[in-house]
Image (cartoon, rainbow, N blue to C red):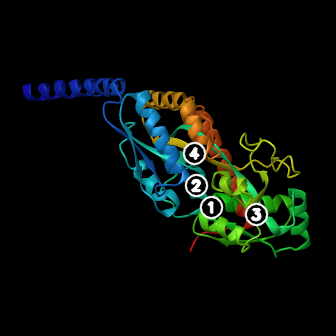
Amino acid sequence: MKKGILKYVALCAIAWLLPHLAIAQNQNWPSQPLRIVVPYPAGGVTDIVARLLAKSLTEKLGATVVVENLAGANGAIGAMAVVRSIPNGYTLLMGTPATLATNMILYSGSQYDAFKDLDPIARVVSMPNALVVRNDLGVNNVSELIELLKKNPGKLSYGVTGIGANGHLTTALFLHKTQTQAMPVPYKGAAPLLAGLIGGQTDFTIDQLTSSVSNIKSGRIKLLAVTSASRSPYFPDTPTLKESGVENFNMGSWLALAAPKTTPAEIIEKLNSAVNQALQDPLFKESLSQFAATPTGGSPAELTQLMHAESETVKFVVQTAKISVEQ
């Protein structure tokens, strides 16, 4: 009888203690190093931005923030590592449109659902895509490119960094809205894609502006428009596709921070505040300028809204363009 009473008292004490311990741990967070998982190889824009952010967050949070590259499966390997980690705020994902919005649509066998398995923290940067053409294509603006495409249905080619990649989906939406046709040519990365465009193996491409900046400035390729809702501050004289006559066009790339689902709300709030503070750092902004990336920030709710909007756009593009990446 006494043992039963003692056991009952012990269980009650544990039940009372556990939530209070959790609260104490959350209040003391962070008490150990954090890691930001980049689901792509080192050296790319996602990796560089993550390392810049990690450095700033280390100062803002008072705890070391490191970057770990876990590449593969269009970002799914790194994303899954975060999804399966303990939701205590110490393992975070530097997400992209692919990992946070579109992989679940493109791959029927996707092992995670970003909307169910991750908690959004904040958008970090926005990076418009750029519509660029080879110099000798004979067009100087979007209208002339559309006219050329309509005169030569299916004969012009455009480079993509992979079927279902952000640039491919953006180009497919452009072709749908302009009622034109062209042939996609896959490349293994932005560098060979741009080399193919400069060398005349393809006619045009829509890909991250960050990848094309140096070639645009050097005059190796011609920038016709950006795909965002507003002009890029780094190329203020370049119109948007919407300004060029392609109605309601707003699709680009972005990077955002996310955590495993059920990460305590107070930790998400602290991380969101630290990210927004980091994005105001003049040195951070200056470092981003070389990639034509714009610091964004905002709330978890705004990032959630962006993820849903991106997902709906991709669903539409995949259905209308009949895009399939399944083998």
Under circle 1, the secondary element is loop
Marks 3 and 2, how far apart in space?
19 Å
Under circle 4, the secondary element is strand
Marks 2 and 1, how far apart in space?
8 Å
* Residue 163 against residue 211 in the figure, above or below: below
Q: Earlier in the sequence, mark 1 or mark 4?
A: 1
Residue 165: mark:
1
Q: Earlier in the sequence, mark 2 or mark 1?
A: 2
Q: Earlier in the sequence, mark 3 or mark 4?
A: 4
Residue 297, horizontal then vertical, whole percent: 59, 34
Mark 1 and 3 residues: CB-CB less than 8 Å, in contact? no
**Disc 3 target residue:** 320
* Residue 269 against residue 52 in the figure, above or below: above
Marks 1 and 3, how far apart in space?
16 Å
Residue 41, horizontal then vertical, whole percent: 47, 58
* Residue 111 against residue 228 in the figure, above or below: below
**At 65% across and 68% down in the image, what residue appears?**
195
**Disc 4 target residue:** 255
Under circle 2, the secondary element is helix
Q: Nearer the viewer, mark 3 or mark 2?
A: 2
The reply to whether residue 279 is visible in this rendering is: no
Give the residue type that dot 1 points to. Ala
Give the residue type that dot 3 points to. Thr
- Disc 2 crowd, CA 10 A, few/some/many (<14, 14-19, 20+): many
**At 47% across and 31% down in the image, what residue appears?**
271
- Which residue is nearer to you in this view: 193 or 183? 193
The C terminus lies in which quarter of the figure? bottom right
Residue 98: mark:
2
Using residue 187 as the reference point, say whether residue 268 is left or right of it.
left
